[in-house]
Image (cartoon, helix red, strand yellow):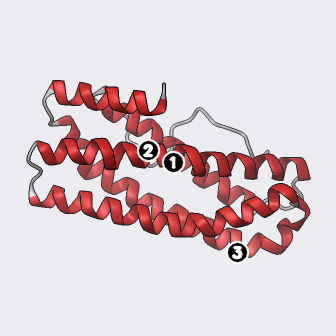
Amino acid sequence: MLLEISKKRSAGAPALYATRATALLGECHERIRHFSALAIRLATAEGAAPAEITETCGSLIRYFGQGLPLHEADEERSVTPALEAAGAAPALHAALVRMEAEHRAIHRELDRLMRTWQILTHSPDKLPRHTHALEVGSRRLDALFEVHLALEEERVFPAIEALPPSARAHLAQEIVARHRL
């Protein structure tokens, strides 16, 4: 089944987050990994039922069109300003700039995939025609995410953990409010 959602942690995700702010961001990373893997499963799903293809494409469109932008807003409107206000070291500043540039690269790939997922929501029978492009694009997207998420988990998350408790609490409040959790 394409849409099967596992409660298992993703292999690349950190096992523990020390504070609520990084826990919330880490949960977003797990969703990104889940939906990235789902895109690959769709591309390689020979013989999937039309309804399952339609439902999977709808889920991918919803997450990457609505959920992912909220996470990016967390990073660009909350995390980056909080870390910059705390006096981000040059290496951290460079990581934050790179993080935003990677968002643009991810969206270029997502734009191509979204167009195909849109087609398949209305014409799931066309999946065989798009399999190769979907697989190449989905694997490229997955690779972009793995590099991007590793940067955040290795450089940005520890910097968040080093913020004063009040700054971390404020950051968590902003994330919760943005996502209406």
Splitting the image into 4 quarters, where does residue 24 fall? Answer: top left
Residue 19: image x %, image y %?
28, 27
Residue 86: image x %, image y %?
11, 42
Query: Residue type at mark 2?
Result: His
In this orientation, does residue 49 appear? Answer: no
Any mark on residue 176, and which? Answer: none
Q: Nearer the viewer, residue 52 or 109?
A: 109
Label 3 sits on residue: 133
Query: Residue type at mark 1?
Result: Leu
In this orientation, does residue 10 appear? Answer: yes
Comes first in the chain, label 1 or label 3: 1
- Compared across the picture, whether 171 is left or right of 23 comes to left
Any mark on residue 68, and which? Answer: 1
Residue 104: image x %, image y %?
43, 66
Query: Residue type at mark 3?
Result: Ala
Q: Secondary structure at mark 3?
A: helix
Q: Are marks 2 and 1 in contact (CB under 8 Å)?
A: yes
Label 2 sits on residue: 71
Q: Nearer the viewer, residue 100 or 34?
A: 100
